[in-house]
Image (spheres, rainbow, N blue to C red):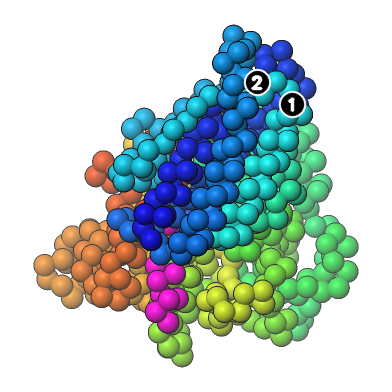
Amino acid sequence: MAESVLGVLGLVGTAIDVLKLGYIASDRKGNITMLRGQLYLESVLLRRWAECVLIGPPGEVPVISTENCAIAHERLTTMLALFRHSGRLIEKHSKDMQPLFPPTQAAEPSLPGRHTTLSNYILKTGVKSSPFKWAVHNAEVLRQLIGDIQTIREGLERLLPSDKQLLSLQILTDIMPSTSIESIPSIDTAARIASENNTVDAVALETLRATLSIRTLSPDTVPTVEETNARMRKLYIVDYSVSTADGALPWKMDRCSVLMSSTQFSSSPRPVIIEWRQFIPELYTDVSLFEADVVKLCWLLSSLKNHPDVHLPLCLGYFKDSNFSSTRFGIVLEYSPTIQISTVETQSRLESLYDALKNGSYRLPATEMRLTFAQNIAASVFQLLSAGWLHKSLRSDNIVLANGLQVIHSASSPKESGTVDFIIAGFEFARLDKPGQVSAGDNRPSKEDLYRHPNATSEKRARHEYQQKGYLKSYDLYSLGVVLSELGFWRRIDELQSSQAAREDWQHAPFPQYLHHRVGRDMPGMMGSRFTRVVLWCLATGQGGMGLSTDQELLAQFEEHVLIPLSQCRRAAAFLS
């Protein structure tokens, strides 16, 4: 059975190599650029399908029936047969041909010394790949060829389905780091056409297109005064009403949930979440400058409106509350339409993961539920990072639960493990990972420092080294590790810090070192060694030489050390339940 899988892997490797060695007549113009994008996307989708389906945890080959392997083998052989005539064409007219793929794409992997999971596996197992050059003489032939490839790959996907959530994130790893603002339209067009032609790709490519859209709305240039004013007019909620007992907003600065209506988004009251930003004269010389920062944040959040990740908030706009003791602005968020929330409970205090961890009425949730929760949080963080965002405040109190710890099962897949409805909030200090962006943050020491990377605590923020480098993406990965620690132990991080005081041998050690020790010692017995390695990798990122210098490297390492192991953990837990 393993031999059958290896045979299919060898053919996949050959097919991917062949796709990248295509040529076309040098004088062909028109829509060749778009077709090149489609062909590149096909190679990415085929490789990622193979990695999801045919390669298991390190050293393992998944159990796939010989019959299914034979069908996959036949379809891949049919795909390679498409290039036989084209292979002869390159021999006759090689001087008049140009490569279909740019050199950077044809020579993957782009990272020095790094190979893809598929290429590493093929190299290790000794499976031989036999690529050859091929060519087409016009766009129509290339279009027909791509259509045939899509049909074959769709058949492979239906025969042996992949993990759609993981696949959609892996595609971001391949495409986003090398994508410029100028190349977005052609990639988006290729993704749209591919998803229209093959419904099996729709979920994965919807995530890619949404991430490309975020990049489009987040240009490298600083907005002009006219652009800022236009955004303000679009996002400012002029008239609104809230359905509360006294018709007024809560006076506290805590995040709250109310029923709100406005001519700008809904004439009937609907549940929304309000996060406050208070104007502090000591920090801003003018309230208009502070409002400009609020507008910038809302504009950033509004780019999520078409994103398929239900755990990222939707931003409706902002309003000014001048009835407060000092001017404050309310950023209005709402849940994804797929999340059903009871309107009866909207005015009560919002429950966060942090609240749930200290709520004694909750029993220890099942391991499978916590693994699914962890996987969904990690996926959302990955999507923000791939879009070029820094969250900067990833904590359990910023993970808002829509319906407590109630597990929701999908209507389309009732047998699959359920999940907890939540959104990631707390974007107060979020910004783009680009030069010139102001790296704002809270410099006051607090328990929030427990979630911060050791190089980004309130104490370190005032130092020259931090001021030089600013906030790094790897710091968000450390915060993710802390949240995953809380999920694994099912204890708040401040409780874990308190336990350090009871240990004489650890009383004077920095808390990050103690947390790393506790995770390595106790987590395997509670959540398994694979989950433990995920947490330890996150906590070690950006320390001791584990710096991630490029976006490509960061996303690839995130995929390898977090996304894939969490997916494997969840599947194993579901199998055992």
Check disc 2 and report its element: helix, strand or loop.
strand
Residue sitting nearer the eye, 93 or 140:
93
Where residue 478 appears, as percent x and y from the top left, is 37, 54
Find disc 1 in the rendering and name its residue.
139
Residue on which disc 2 sits: 24
Q: Amino acid at mark 1?
A: Ala
* Image quarter hosting the N terminus: bottom left
Task: Answer whether labels 2 and 1 touch (C-beta < 8 Å).
Answer: yes
Q: Which residues are magenta?
A: 563-577
Mark 2 surroundings: few (<14), some (14-19) or many (≥20) residues within 10 A: many
Q: Which mark is residue 507?
A: none
Query: Is residue 571 within the magenta segment?
Result: yes
Judging from the image, what secondary structure is the residue with disc 1 in? helix
User: Is residue 455 inside the magenta stretch?
Assistant: no
Q: Is residue 289 above or below residue 407?
A: above
| Relative vertical location of residue 255 with respect to residue 13 in this rendering, above or below | below
Q: Give the x, y percent position of residue 134.
A: 58, 25
**Quadrant where the image shows the C terminus:** bottom left
* Residue ID at (58%, 70%): 422
Which three-letter amino acid code belongs to the residue tagged 2?
Ile
Magenta region's main secondary structure? helix
